[in-house]
Image (cartoon, rainbow, N blue to C red):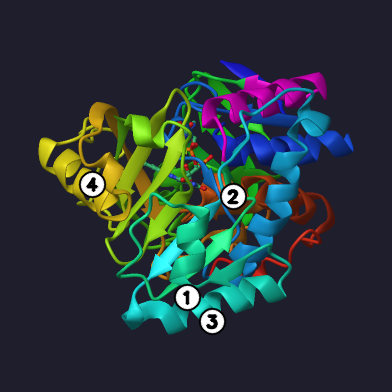
Amino acid sequence: MSRLIADVVIVGAGIVGCSVAYHLAQQRKARVLIVEKSAIAGGMTKRSGALIRTQLAHPVEARLAIASVKFFRQWKEHTGANCGYTPTGLAIVAGEEHAARLREQTARVQALGANVQTLAPDELRSLQPTARVNDVALASYEPDAAFVDPLLATQTLAARVKELGGVFKTGTFVKRIRVEYGRVTGIETSVGVIETLNVVLCAGVWTERLLQPLKIELGLQTRRAQLAFFERSADLKVGHLAFEDWITGAHFRPHSFGLTMGALNATDEDANPDSFDESVSSAFINDVQQRVATRLPAMAHARFVRGHSGVYDISPTGHAIVGRVPSIGGLFVATGLHNIGLTIAPALGACLAELVLDGEARTVDVSALGVA
Ligand SMILES: Cc1cc2nc3c(=O)[nH]c(=O)nc-3n(C[C@H](O)[C@H](O)[C@H](O)COP(=O)(O)OP(=O)(O)OC[C@H]3O[C@@H](n4cnc5c(N)ncnc54)[C@H](O)[C@@H]3O)c2cc1C
């Protein structure tokens, strides 16, 4: 049994854990160790749809996204490498029933500094002439929305962390967080004990399993979500905007290699993150294709190429849970990231690093998302 000592231990080397590690390591104030049971980005990050956008319903999440978009655009300056950042633009479309909510949401994130604007249906049609808009009452347009390669983003961030002195222990399972007299003292892993006074739990859908022995309940749900990739028809070879469609209940975006990735806005059944069905069903493929083709009729005969599933971590409020765990000194958590974890990861990592090192998050005040 080896015995290691670190100032800060991060559990989980997904995009969030690596972002926290980057922001900590960059300050060179603490010895940082990242413990990961599988591989870097081996959890839900590699399954992500990886659409990056700022138009999120919760104002703190929107602020995190706005700060994160800047980071994504300057990825090379931060890491020395690319993350596959590919701008697409995003249109959120609503019918009469939800137009007022979309207008209000757009105004709210615009006031926070996001580059978004509302469009009338004919304006959307000018931007995306191949789109059907006769059922659209209002669209919200975000020109800077993009997608990244989630694996590449996490790996390049991790490589920079290593250059800055951070240490990764992959293939190492964290069995338990040790707490004595209300304060973290270390973690027990499959290869021994690691002593530390600070643990940042970035274990995504597995978070609750490490908190339950400490009698902390976040009430997270773990829900399966399927993604399908289709080969675009000749009419759409040049690409198209990403869409979050509140009318059809689907979202989709262009992907590399002339593909379009589509998914449903609603989630599937509860899923065990260690044993869920990783494939996609033919019912889902037909359903999502029909919904995508309702907006982009040229997708009606697109060929299904491949698909996969992942699991979302969903909190009782539907929003992220971020910050210190009040009942245990030195324990921090970031979870409940649902379908926005990639989008907000850079700023979220900065905030957690600030909380650990300085006791307060300056990049964005995340106290409204704190552990109850
Ligand atoms: C299908 C799907 C589509 C998505 N689409 C988008 C999107 O378009 N845009 C967007 O912004 N977000 C999207 N998301 C959400 C986003 O991908 C996630 O929120 C984000 O990747 C979560 O990162 P994470 O680092 O918190 O978790 P993970 O990537 O899951 O990392 C957690 C890590 O912790 C490790 N771990 C867990 N328990 C232990 C333990 N006991 N010991 C050691 N290691 C442990 C795991 O192995 C894992 O590697 C999507 C998610 C899914 C599932």
Distance in Å between CA atoms under marks 2 and 3: 19 Å
Image quarter (top left, top right, bottom left or bottom right) of the N terminus: top right
Distance in Å between CA atoms under marks 3 and 4: 28 Å
Say if 302 sits above or below 226 in the image. above
Q: Nearer the viewer, residue 70 or 137?
A: 137
Q: Which residue is mark 3?
A: 104
Instruction: Identify the main secondary structure in magenta.
Output: helix
Say if 346 sits above or below 336 in the image. above
Q: Are marks 2 and 3 in contact (CB under 8 Å)?
A: no
Q: Amino acid at mark 4?
A: Val
Q: Which residue is mark 1?
A: 102
The answer to whether the residue bearing label 3 lies less than 8 angstroms from the nearest atom of ligand 1 is: no
Return the residue found at the far top.
Answer: 1
Question: Which span is picked out in magenta?
Answer: 147-168
Distance in Å between CA atoms under marks 1 and 3: 5 Å
Q: Amino acid at mark 1?
A: Leu
**Structural crowding at the residue carrying mark 4, measured as other residues with C-alpha within 10 Å and reported as few (<14), some (14–19) or many (≥20):** many
